[in-house]
């Protein structure tokens, strides 16, 4: 144990190989400062050593995948890895199997903002939520357009097609091509005619009977309606899904 100050009876932790003690609790451990060049380069150390920990003072971002910035780094034996805590930002969204608020994450269930802690209300208002949180129940998330309001609802799980939704297709149909046919009629006639005998009217009957036909060029078409047999049942647009809870981060 290394002690800073005077302690009557310091008790070292038996599980620690090294323990530092600050009696006034106003001093810390200063890690060695080095200027790293890249995460895949051991320099300024001669080689990669697993477990080595340093504070990097240099900035090198020429190669984005191996660049370094000031901060703590540890070595895993083949490269340097930055030590950092990834904290969520206000407004971050996540899915979870947890059903209730936790660690600054608030369930998007349509509740009024006045029921949230003061800090969470302020954060929600800064995101554009004025009176309530969005209700994510039975909803999918999508990126908003420039004209949409953040948290607005829309869309449908089914749609009923109308004629305007159908392809613009013309179906042509005709009767059998062997449509040539004859019409038979009788030209026999009877009636009253003026006789040449004495100027008297006589009933004259035409007993000549001639059978004639129309032209054989009688092929033609008929217009008819065809029923689709549909029942106007809406189409279900909902894909297969896995239900979960959706949260927004409003801070702790």
Image (tube, rainbow, N blue to C red):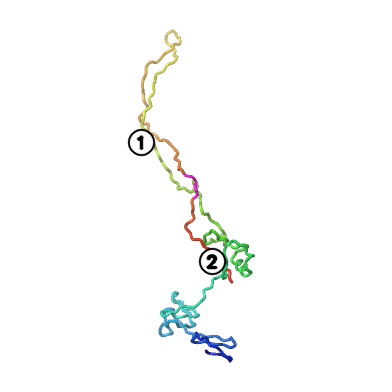
Left or right, 247 with respect to 170, comes to right
Which residue is labeled 1 in the image? Answer: 177
Is 167 located above or below residue 129 in the figure? above
Q: Position of residue 135 (x, y in %)?
A: 57, 60
Residue at the extreme top of the image, as rendered: 198
Give residue 140's mark.
none
Q: Place residue 105 in its image quadrant.
A: bottom right
Secondary element at image label 1: loop
Where residue 40 appears, as percent x and y from the top left, is 42, 79
Considering the numbered disc 2 on the image, is that residue within a helix, a strand or a loop?
loop
Q: In front: mark 2 or mark 1? A: 2
Q: Position of residue 100 (x, y in %)?
A: 57, 66
Residue 173 against residue 97 in the figure, above or below: above
Q: Earlier in the sequence, mark 2 or mark 1?
A: 2
Residue matched to label 2: 98
| Residue occupying the point 49% across, 80% down | 72
Image quadrant of residue 6? Answer: bottom right
- Numbered circles on residues, count: 2
Q: Which residues are magenta?
A: 230-234
Q: Position of residue 33 (x, y in %)?
A: 49, 85
Q: Is residue 68 above or below residue 250?
A: below
């Amino acid at each position: 144990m290394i002690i800073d100050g005077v302690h009557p009876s310091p008790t070292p932790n038996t599980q620690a190989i090294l323990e530092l003690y600050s009696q006034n609790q106003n001093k810390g451990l200063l890690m060695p400062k080095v200027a790293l060049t890249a995460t895949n380069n051991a320099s300024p150390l001669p080689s990669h050593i697993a477990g080595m920990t340093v504070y990097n003072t240099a900035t090198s971002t020429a190669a984005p995948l191996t660049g370094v910035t000031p901060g703590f780094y540890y070595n895993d034996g083949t490269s340097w890895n930055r030590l950092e805590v990834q904290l969520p930002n206000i407004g971050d969204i996540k899915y979870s199997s947890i059903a209730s608020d936790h660690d600054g994450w608030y369930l998007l269930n349509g509740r009024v903002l006045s029921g949230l802690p003061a800090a969470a209300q302020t954060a929600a208002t800064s995101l554009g939520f004025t009176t309530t949180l969005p209700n994510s129940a039975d909803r999918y998330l999508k990126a908003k357009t420039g004209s949409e309001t953040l948290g607005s609802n829309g869309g449908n799980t089914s749609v009923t097609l109308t004629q305007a939704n159908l392809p613009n297709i013309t179906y042509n149909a005709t009767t059998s091509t062997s449509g040539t046919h004859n019409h038979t009629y009788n030209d026999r006639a009877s009636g009253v005619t003026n006789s040449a005998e004495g100027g008297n009217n006589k009933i004259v009957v035409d007993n000549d009977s001639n059978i004639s036909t129309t032209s054989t060029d009688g092929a033609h078409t008929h217009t008819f309606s065809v029923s689709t047999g549909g029942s106007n049942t809406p189409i279900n647009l909902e894909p297969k899904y896995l239900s979960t809870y959706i949260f927004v981060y409003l801070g702790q």
